[in-house]
Image (spheres, rainbow, N blue to C red):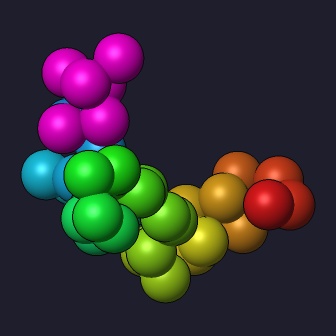
Amino acid sequence: MSEQLATLVTAGVVARTRVGRSVVYRRTTRGDALLQALGRRG
């Protein structure tokens, strides 16, 4: 799973943030735009 997430981070569609010992991933505005272009809601 980490390899797929790393690819999405590199593409700029998700961002990675460390919270304590956890890593949280969130969709970026670029990711939102991609979903919108594909006609999907997030």
Residue 33 pos. (x, y %): 57, 74
Judge from the rendering whether residue 25 lies leftward or rightward of residue 7; answer left or right: right
Residue 29 pos. (x, y %): 49, 82
Kindly report the secondary structure that dominates the magenta region of the rendered protein. Answer: helix
The number of callouts visible is 0
Q: Is residue 15 visible?
A: no
Q: Is residue 40 visible?
A: yes
38 falls in the magenta region: no
* Viewer-nearest residue: 41 or 18: 18
Residue shown at the point (42%, 56%) measured from the top left: 25
Picture quarter with the C terminus:
bottom right
Residue 2 drawn above or below residue 32: above
- The image quadrant that residue 2 belongs to is top left
The single residue placed furthest to the bottom in the displayed view is 29
Residue 23 drawn above or below residue 18: above
* Viewer-nearest residue: 35 or 19: 19
Residue shown at the point (26%, 52%) measured from the top left: 21
The boundaries of the magenta stretch are: 1-6
Residue 12 pos. (x, y %): 26, 64
Residue 8 drawn above or below residue 19: above
- The image quadrant that residue 35 belongs to is bottom right
2 falls in the magenta region: yes
Picture quarter with the N terminus:
top left
